[in-house]
Image (cartoon, rainbow, N blue to C red):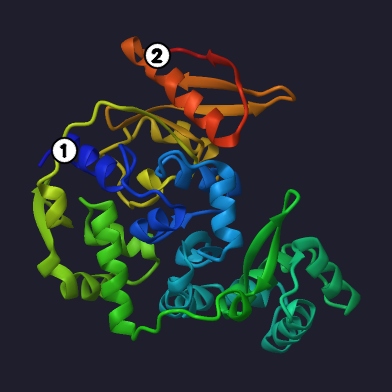
């Protein structure tokens, strides 16, 4: 199995080349979880995989409580199916919180302080109420609890991993918080072993071909637990070797044609990159620093051609529409027209006319 085959199969399995799913929650369920620390980026990550979906359709799925945004895998915000959010938190939360103990202690956030914060936040949100981040931090400050020096962020983060809160609908331009138990009163209950198997099946079905190390990194679990999850579902998977590594995928994906010559404008933090520890099959090592300038953890929106990340892009919102700046790392040739089509699709997604598209810093 070559890197080209790996890239093409991932394009298919991650629903980038095309999707039969018509509803946003179906896409999120198929992928298992999508990194969502940038709100508009994850909206596009779902939208590009949902035929004819607009931004308002995905936001409606959040309002209707079909998908939930909260801190989950790897200590960062993800978009997950509402019925799965609690077992995912139970599977990954204790390890993530344990890894953050020293940081919480450094900030003076002991168990007593955190319990007091939870009480204040619970009282503010109970009864179906919503509040944005600034509202909750103001309440904590009024109670004499400092939220400066990232303490406020860590408090909300910890409350989410304790299963107290999650993100609710957007109010204007601000994401709100709600009580998780009120927002998602019904959810699946799985044992630890069942959770490992379920998460592994979701991962390898949507992200394959992938290695067990990729799965462990994506889920934020130990390599031992990742192997246990994989062992439980091997009967549903198929493996092939590439450069001495074993790659797993669903048996259904093996029958798919492994040839994609499409052009895609992927969002920053897309699963095509963030879904894997080893990204070398789709991203050249010399190119990687241009996707994450300064190695600061902020992944820029990516231009993908023939399965390879070969550029970055940005959109600029204007009063009358939207403009694009495309920065390819190599000559686009005949792909330039397809880039225009991809930009038009994004403009339609956000409901704005495409005003202009510029190609900057050509290789």
Disc sitting over residue 83 in the figure: none
Considering only vertical position in the picture, is 142 above or below 315?
below
Of residues 108 and 188, the one nearer the viewer is: 188
Of residues 278 and 124, the one nearer the viewer is: 124
Q: Which residue is mark 2?
A: 337
In this picture, residue 351 sits left or right of residue 221: right
In this picture, residue 346 sits left or right of residue 223: right
Of residues 275 and 82, the one nearer the viewer is: 82
**Image location of residue 116, percent across then percent down:** 76, 86
Label 1 secondary element? helix
The image quadrant that residue 198 belongs to is: bottom left
Nearer the camera: disc 1 or disc 2: 2
Considering only vertical position in the picture, is 186 above or below 267?
below
Q: Which residue is mark 1?
A: 5
Is residue 284 shown to the viewer in this render? yes
Mark 1 or mark 2, which has the lower sequence index? 1
Please tell me how crowded label 1 is: few (under 14), some (14-19), or many (20+) other residues with Cα within 10 Å.
some
Please tell me how crowded label 2 is: few (under 14), some (14-19), or many (20+) other residues with Cα within 10 Å.
few
Instruction: Name, please, the residue furthest toward the bottom.
Output: 112
Q: Quadrant of the N terminus?
A: top left
Label 2 secondary element? helix
**Image location of residue 296, percent across then percent down:** 55, 45
The image quadrant that residue 183 belongs to is: bottom right
Considering only vertical position in the picture, is 210 above or below 10?
below
Write the residue at 29% across / 60% down: 203
Write the residue at 35% across / 83% down: 190
Q: Quadrant of the C terminus?
A: top left
Write the residue at 18% across / 34% down: 4
Task: Tell me how far mark 1 sits from mark 2, CA to CA.
Answer: 25 Å
Instruction: Name, please, the residue furthest toward the top.
Output: 333
**Image location of residue 204, percent across then percent down:** 24, 59
């Amino acid at each position: 199995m070559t890197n080209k085959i790996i890239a093409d199969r991932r394009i298919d399995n991650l629903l980038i080349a095309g999707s039969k799913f018509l509803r946003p929650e179906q896409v999120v369920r198929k992928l298992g979880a999508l990194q969502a620390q940038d709100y508009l980026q994850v909206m596009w990550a779902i939208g590009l995989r949902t035929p004819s979906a607009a931004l308002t359709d995905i936001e409606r799925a959040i309002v209707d409580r079909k998908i939930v945004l909260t801190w989950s895998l790897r200590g960062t915000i993800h978009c997950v199916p509402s019925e799965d959010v609690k077992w995912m938190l139970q599977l990954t939360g204790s390890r993530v919180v344990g890894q953050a103990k020293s940081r919480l202690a450094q900030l003076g956030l002991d168990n007593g302080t955190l319990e007091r914060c939870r009480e204040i936040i619970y009282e503010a949100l109970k009864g179906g109420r919503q509040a944005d981040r600034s509202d909750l931090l103001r309440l904590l400050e009024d109670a004499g609890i400092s939220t400066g020096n990232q303490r406020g962020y860590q408090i909300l983060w910890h409350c989410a991993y304790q299963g107290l809160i999650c993100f609710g609908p957007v109010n204007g331009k601000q994401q709100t918080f709600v009580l998780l138990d009120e927002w998602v009163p019904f959810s699946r209950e799985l044992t630890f072993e069942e959770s490992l198997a379920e998460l592994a099946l979701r991962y390898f079905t949507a992200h394959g071909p992938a290695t067990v190390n990729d799965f462990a990194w994506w889920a934020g679990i130990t390599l031992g637990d990742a192997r246990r999850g994989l062992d439980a579902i091997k009967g549903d998977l198929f493996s092939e070797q590439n450069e001495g590594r074993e790659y797993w995928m669903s048996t259904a994906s093996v029958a798919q044609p492994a040839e994609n010559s499409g052009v895609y404008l992927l969002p920053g933090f897309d699963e095509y990159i963030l879904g894997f520890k080893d990204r070398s099959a789709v991203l050249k090592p010399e190119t990687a620093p241009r996707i994450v300038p300064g190695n600061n953890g902020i992944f820029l929106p990516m231009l993908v051609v023939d399965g390879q990340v070969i550029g970055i892009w940005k959109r600029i919102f204007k009063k009358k529409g939207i403009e694009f700046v495309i920065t390819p790392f190599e000559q686009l040739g005949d792909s330039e027209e397809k880039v225009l089509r991809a930009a038009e699709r994004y403009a339609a997604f956000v409901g704005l006319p495409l005003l202009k598209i510029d190609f900057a810093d050509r290789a």
